[in-house]
Image (cartoon, rainbow, N blue to C red):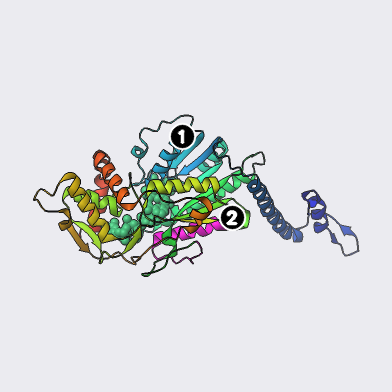
Amino acid sequence: MHPCWCPLFFRRLLSFTTENGFVREGWSVPLLAPALFVHSVMRIEKDRFFFRECNKKRQKDMDNQKTVLVTGGCGFIGANFVRLLNQEKRSWRLINLDKLTYAGNLQNLAGIEEGENYRFVKGDIGDVVLLESLFTEERIDIVVHFAAESHVDRSITGPADFIRTNIVGTFTLLEAARNAWMDDSSRVDAPLFLHVSTDEVYGSLGETGFFSETTPFDPRSPYSASKASSDHLVSAYYHTYGLPTIITNCSNNYGPYQFPEKLIPLIFNNAMQGKKLPVYGDGKNIRDWLYVVDHCQAIVAVLEKGRPGRRYNIGGNNEKQNKDVVRLICDTLDRKVGLLPNGRPRTELITFVSDRLGHDRRYAIDATRISEELGWQPAISFEKGIEKTIDWYLDNREWVAAVVDGSYRDYYRDMYENR
Ligand code: NAD
Ligand code: TDX
C-alpha cells in the first residue's frame, strides 16, 4: 500500500458502528490499544522501507567523505584500526568513543592529532544521552563497534561488566543508530553498523572441522555468551527494523598494543623478566592466530564491499597449540636479546598451571566467504607476525612498563599466584 493511503486506512480502522446504527469516526478508548499497535507496526514498516531504500543507494564510493564512529578505539584492535584508517582513508572523519577502562589507553593512539579528521570522546556506549548527542552533532555514516570487555579470564571471575557493556551497551548503541538514522530522511549515503565479534560464539571444536558462518552458536564462557547475545541483538535489528548491519566473527588477534593479560604479550612480558610462563592445562588447546593489521584490513574490505545482513568469519589460517606459541616466543627472544642471565633458554620458564574453567579446546575459522565474496586473505604468516610483534614490544618497552602498573600487578597476583 502506498503511504499516502495511510490516513484513510487509519480513519477506516478507527471507525465503528454505534448502538443506534450510526457510523462514528475518531479515537475511542477501546480502539486506542489496536491503534497504538498499528502505529508501532507502521513505524517498523517505515524503518524497513527507509533502510531498504538506503541499501539500494549504498555507494561503493567509500573514498568519499564519511564520518565513522569507532567504539573502543583506544583498545588493542580499535587502536590498530584507527591507525590504519588514519593512513588509508584520509578523507574520513573518525570519532573514537572509548570509556578508557583498564584496557583502553590513550597512548595507543599517540601521534594521532585531534582535528578535522579525528575526535576522541571519553564515554560509555551505554550512555543514551551521550550517544544521542554524538549522532546528532556528527551525522555518523558508519559505526564500527569494537568496545567490549574482552578477556575470558576476567569474565569468569567477574561477569557483570561483560553483561553491561557487551549486551546492554550494544543494545544502547543499536537503539541510538536506529533513532538517528531512521529519522534522517535527508541522508544521501546508506549508513552501516559493523559489529566486531568473535569466533568464540561458536563454542569449542574437536580435532577436526571449522567454524563457518552457519555453525550454530554454542558459547561456553560468560565472555562468549555476552558476545553471542550481542550478535543476536545486531541480527535482530537487521531483520526486524532493517537496520543495515554486518557482523564479523574473528579468531585470536595478536600484534602491537595488545594488553598483557592475553597470552602472547603476557608471555613476552614474563619471559623478558625471567618470570614463570603460565600455560593452562596441558597446553594443547588450539587457537587460530591472526595478525591484527590483517584483521583491520578485513574490516575495511567488509565496510567497502560487505553486504548488510551478512556475517563474515575472519581467520588467520594459522592453527597453533598454546605450548608451541609459548615456545616460539621463548626461542625468538633468546635469539633477539640473548639467553637468560643464568645462561639458560627461556623455555625453562614454562610452567603448566591449573586449567581455565570451561576452557575451549580448539577454534578454527573457515574464511571462505570473505575470501570469495570480498577478496580478502590474511597477508602475514604467523612466523613473520610473531617477529614483527616481538620487535614492536622490544622497541616499545616503555609502553609495556606503563601499562603493567599497580592495577595490573593486583590482577596478575589474583589470577596467577595460587594457580
Ligand atoms: P580490548 O579489551 O583491548 O579493548 C576494548 C576497548 O573498549 C578498550 O579501549 C576499552 O576502554 C573500551 N571499552 C570497554 N567498555 C567500554 C564501554 N562501556 N564504553 C566504551 N568503551 C568501552 O579489546 P580488543 O582485543 O581490542 O577487542 C576489540 C573487539 O574485538 C571486542 O569486541 C572483542 O570482543 C573483539 N574480538 C577480539 C579478539 C582478540 O583476539 N582480541 C578476537 C575476536 C574478536
Ligand atoms: O596465561 C595464560 N596462559 C594460557 O595458557 C593465558 C592468558 C592464556 N592461556 C591460554 C588460554 C587460551 O587457550 O592461551 C589461549 C589464548 O588465551 P587468551 O589470550 O586469553 O585468548 P582467548 O581466551 O583465546 O580469547 C581471545 O580470542 C578471542 C580474546 O581474548 C577474545 O577477546 C577473542 O574474542
The quadrant where residue 123 appears: top left
Residue 167 appears at what percent x and percent y? 47, 56
Mark 1 crowdedness (10 Å alpha carbons): few <14, some 14-19, many ≥20: some
**Residue 231 painted magenta:** yes
Q: Quadrant of the N terminus?
A: bottom right
Which residue corresponds to mark 1?
119
Mark linked to residue 409: none
Q: Is residue 39 above or below residue 83?
A: below
Residue 154 seen in render: no
Query: In the shown orientation, is residue 157 left or right of residue 199?
Result: left
In the rendered image, which residue does mark 2 sit on? Answer: 238
Tell me the amino acid under the disc marked 2. Tyr
Name the residue nearer the viewer: 230 or 379.
379
Left or right of residue 303: residue 34: right
Q: Is residue 59 magenta?
A: no
> Which of pointers 1 and 2 lies earlier in the amino acid sequence?
1
Q: Secondary structure at mark 1?
A: strand
Q: What residue do we see at 37% from left, 55% from top?
A: 252
Q: Would you say 371 lies left or right of 275 here?
A: right
Can residue 380 be seen in this snapshot? yes
Q: Quadrant of residue 283?
A: bottom left
Q: Work out how far the residue at label 1 is from the one at label 2, CA to CA, in angstroms.
A: 28 Å
Instruction: Say which of 184 and 99 sits in front.
Output: 184
Q: Name the one closer to the observer, 177 or 364.
A: 364
Residue 223 horizontal/vertical position (percent) = 40, 59
* Helix, strand or loop at mark 2: helix
Magenta residue span: 213-237
Coordinates of residue 127 in the picture (x, y in percent): 49, 45
Task: Residue at 21% x, 53% y: name it.
Answer: 330
Q: Nearer the viewer, residue 212 or 81?
A: 212
